[in-house]
Amino acid sequence: MKWVGRNHFHFLRSWGFSLREVELEKVPLAALEEQHRASDPLQKTFAALMISYANGDTISDSLETAHRYGVRLHSVSDYAATFRKAADA
């Protein structure tokens, strides 16, 4: 599965993104738990996020929270469309 369509590559390349394909990787929960025991705070944070996702956790009041902090939520499709607009400009 490609991360973005071919017409977005020029735009992404101009910002220093690589043009590799993204692959789904299944990681055992035990490996995530091991990563969470790391001393690096960034590794701990990402491991915690992945463990939560693996357990099916959701943010039930995400719309309310986003509104409270002035954040506009976007779908992946809407976000990808911003690359198309920028590439076409």
Image (tube, rainbow, N blue to C red):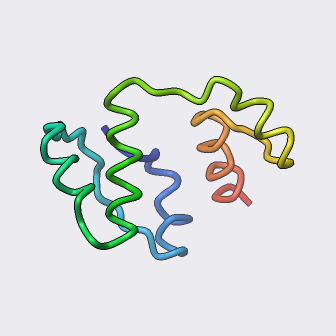
Q: Position of residue 8 (x, y in %)?
A: 52, 54
Q: Position of residue 72 (x, y in %)?
A: 79, 42
Q: Is residue 69 left or right of residue 2?
A: right
Question: Compared with residue 35, is residue 71 higher up or lower down, i.e. above or below?
Answer: above
Q: Is residue 68 left or right of residue 56?
A: right
Question: Compared with residue 48, is residue 14 higher up or lower down, i.e. above or below?
Answer: below
Which quadrant of the structure image shows residue 68?
top right
Total tally of numbered discs in the picture? 0
Q: Nearer the viewer, residue 3 or 50?
A: 50
Residue drawn at (21%, 47%) of the image: 33
Residue drawn at (35%, 43%) of the image: 50
Q: Is residue 24 left or right of residue 61?
A: left
Residue drawn at (30%, 48%) of the image: 22
**For the C terminus, which image quadrant?**
bottom right
Q: Position of residue 79 (x, y in %)?
A: 64, 44
Q: Nearer the viewer, residue 12 or 46?
A: 46
**For the N terminus, which image quadrant?**
top left
Question: Compared with residue 86, is residue 67 higher up or lower down, i.e. above or below?
Answer: above
Q: Position of residue 55 (x, y in %)?
A: 34, 27
